[in-house]
Each structure stands twice: as C-alpha cells, then as structure tokens.
Amino acid sequence: MGRYRTNPMKSLVFKFIKEEDFQNKLNIISEFNFVHFEKWFQIELACYFKKKKFFNYCPFTWTAEYSHTNKKGKIIPDFTIFYHTSGNEFYTEIKQYDSFITCFNKMVDDFYKVKNAVDKKNSENINCIGVFKTEYFSEDKLSNLKDGFKKDKHIITKIEEIKIKEIPNTKYSLMYF
C-alpha cells in the first residue's frame, strides 16, 4: 500500500459541509428533531464523493473481528475507500450524536475497533467523522477529553490533529480525526 503526504479525504469532507443543498437537508433534520442520522450522512457523503470522482468505493465483503477493553465483536467500517492516486485504502467511521462528548467518545471507540481489526500498526489510514450540535461544544471539553488519552500514542496522534468546524447555516458542527 502506498503512502500519502496528506489525507485527501479531509479537505473534501470540509468542502462538502459548505454545500448549500447539504446544509438545507441538515436544517430539515434539525427542524423535525430527527436523531441518529448517521446512515443519511453516509449516503450524502458517498454521493458527494462520487460526484467529485474522489474514489473507488470498496464495499467490505468481510467483517473484521476486534477486541478492545475486553469487548469482542465484529466491525464493518462505514466506508472503505481506495484512493487511486496514491494507492491507499482509507477506513472511515461516521458518528452522529447531539452531544459533543458522546460523539467524541463513540468516534474513539470506533477508531480502536477499526485499528485493532484492520491495521494494528498504522492508524494514518483510519478516519473518524462526527456530527454533533454546536451548542454542546467547548474548547474546555475538548481539552479534557484529549488529556484522557495522553498515554495512548496511537489515538493521541490522531486526536491532536482533530479539526472541528461549524457547518455553515446550521446548528451542527463536524469533527474529523
């Protein structure tokens, strides 16, 4: 598998949230108080990626076993994307919770599941995307959450690179690591 200098998904995800059509749909979701719209977000993101000819989607034809903190199970990442330019495969997990803290913690849980199931040594090709209500975010909360992971070199590297942006014209923000 080839190496990449920058993660091409990150910039595309942040362009995606600027799309007016996406923002309008997200506002409808908010207006009707829909919750747990991860799958909808996944479909919207896949349509955007396809429109931009960003990737070849590689559907998982297998479930990877994982074990983390004495839990065992199976995981299928939301996206497995083969980026043809670099020859890299990216594994992406998507989470949506109103609460910033819950969203963050669920993203970390999924990061570990994918990492332990797919690639125990390299975490650069694992992406986590979370959508949460902006009103529940604060820099202090983020700082406290980061402090809890300082001893784990795999996740702290990812968390230190975390990007959080408000989704324009909506009540939501997007978190990416």
Image (tube, rainbow, N blue to C red):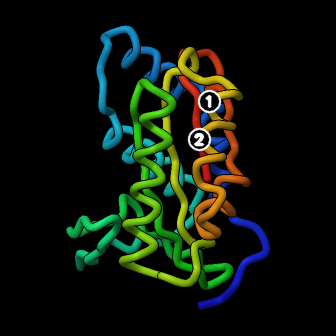
Q: Is residue 69 above or below residue 105?
A: below
Snapshot quadrant of residue 168 = top right
Q: Where 86 falls versus 42 (above or below)? A: below
Say what secondary structure mark 2 lies in: helix
Looking at the picture, how far across and down is residue 7, in whole percent? 69, 65
The residue sitting at 33% across, 33% down in the picture is: 37
**In the image shown, does 82 or 112 lie closer to the viewer?**
112
Q: In the drawing, does residue 78 fall left or right of residue 72? A: right
Circle 1 residue:
141
**Residue furthest toward the left?**
73
**Res 152 → quadrant:** bottom right
Contact? badges 2 and 1 (CB < 8 Å):
yes
- Residue 83 lies left or right of residue 59; in this view the side is right
Q: Residues within 10 Å of mark 1 (few under 14, many from 20)?
A: few
Q: 52 or 10, which is in the foreground?
A: 10
Q: Residue at x 41, y 62 (%)?
A: 79
Q: Is the N terminus in the top left, top right, bottom left or bottom right quadrant?
A: bottom right
Amino acid type at circle 2 is Leu
The residue drawn where x is 56% and y is 15% is: 135
- The residue type indicated by label 1 comes to Lys
Q: Secondary structure beneath disc 1?
A: helix
- Which residue in the protein does label 2 denote? 145
Q: Position of residue 106 (x, y in %)?
A: 40, 46
